[in-house]
Amino acid sequence: MATMDKTSVRNEIERLKQQFEHLNSAGKVSPEVQVVMSSLLVVVELILSIFLEKKTRKTSKNSGIPPSQTEKDETAAPQHNRKGKKRKLNGEVSNTRINETVTIAKVETCDVCGVDLDNTPCQDHERRTKIDIVFEKVVEHVDAEIKQCPNCDATVKGDFPQDMPGNLQYGNGLKAFAIHLIISQMVALNRVQKQIAAMIGSVISEASLLKFVWRLHQALEGWEAEAIETLLQAPSLHVDETSFRVEGKNHWIHVYSSGGTTLKLLHRKRGKEAIVGIDIIPRYGGVIIHDCWASYLSYDHCGHGLCGSHLLRELVFVIDSNGYRWANNMKKLLQETCRTVAEKKEKSLTDKEYAWVFIYFLKEVMNLV
């Protein structure tokens, strides 16, 4: 008995449909049989769709299941030469002092005949570059004078700079580097201590490192309030959440983003309680773009849009399980639109481009044109 897969089953159903349409066009099918066969074909399509969906395994690539809950496919071929997204810096780093030199390698004599070339004009240059970094420890001592007033016998001491309130303090460069390791790179405190100790020759306590972070938090309170107001005025708002461990317990980082403004706020809950506590969506009147999470959909005073990345994963599942043409066309439309927007400086479609997207959607996805 020949084996059957979803492709062969689909092909067989398509063959039967074409055969029925041919007989119907030739007038060999009565109206009663026509109704019965059309109904049967719809039922067969429905049963096949349900069966194939149950046979298709859901993963993080074709559904909303997180990667941590997806079993590794040991039979899958290894992916080599994967090209990740590379951030282009173009050599520009705003917080780094660059010491750049140019040395001319002179040509004094001809390597072939030995003639003197000192007075021969240079036609061109070939450049080679070496980039290196130097860790420089900067120690600044301020010695305040202490004097005895000959007039009133008072002891007078010189004033220290405002950023030197104690016997020992650390500069903004070192603080910024420590915060970068802790927050951006998520390096453990004890490893941050070891790295900084290797650079400056002394150990900074964990309490001091945490104080650096806390003072930055306090300094950003004003900016955070302004950022929230900016997000509330935006026409659309991207929202998402991801789990995060705090003191061994599960918490959630809630992300709110629009344009160049992004806020990440920590809360011990994921759903409605967190949304109410953060109090951005309840005050927002634009369109929130999300992953169809029920807590977001409960806010009917907002417009709603579904995240393109999540839609793509769901479309992959529909294509894998049923192979629908409309799903494949919708996937292509989302990917091409995303690519077009990403390549544009203003990160948006023109009216003409949007009209093309809409027409393609009606024609290739909805089959209405």
Image (tube, rainbow, N blue to C red):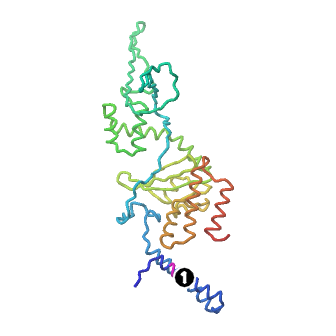
Q: Is residue 122 above or below residue 238?
A: above
The furthest residue to the top: 150
Q: Position of residue 103 (x, y in %)?
A: 45, 25
Q: Is residue 11 magenta?
A: yes
Q: Which residue is located at x 49 percent, y 58 percent?
A: 273
Q: Is 245 on the left or on the right of 36, as rendered?
A: left
Instruction: Looking at the picture, tell me which residue is in the foreground, 111 or 347.
Output: 111
> In which quarter of the view is residue 178 placed?
top left
Q: Position of residue 62 (x, y in %)?
A: 47, 65
How busy is the neighbourhood of tag 1: few (under 14 within 10 Å), some, or many (20 plus)? Answer: few
Q: Is residue 63 above or below residue 124?
A: below
Q: Is residue 78 visible?
A: yes
Q: Which residue is located at x 47 percent, y 50 percent?
A: 85
Q: Is residue 164 visible?
A: no
Q: Which residue is located at x 40 percent, y 33 percent?
A: 132
Query: Overall secondary structure of the magenta stretch?
Result: helix
Quadrant of the frame with the N terminus: bottom left
Instruction: Looking at the picture, tell me which residue is in the foreground, 314 or 320.
Output: 320
Total labels: the figure holds 1
> In which quarter of the view is residue 111 placed?
top left
Q: Position of residue 266 (x, y in %)?
A: 45, 51
Question: Helix or strand or loop: what does disc 1 sit on?
Answer: helix
Q: Is residue 37 magenta?
A: no
Bounds of the magenta span? 10-14
Instruction: Looking at the picture, tell me which residue is in the foreground, 296 or 8.
Output: 8
Q: Is residue 361 above or below residue 150?
A: below
Quadrant of the frame with the C terminus: bottom right
Q: Name the kind of residue labelled 1 in the image.
A: Arg
Q: Which residue is located at x 55 percent, y 52 percent?
A: 280
Q: Is residue 58 above or below residue 352?
A: below
Q: Position of residue 343 (x, y in %)?
A: 58, 50
Q: Which residue is mark 1?
A: 15
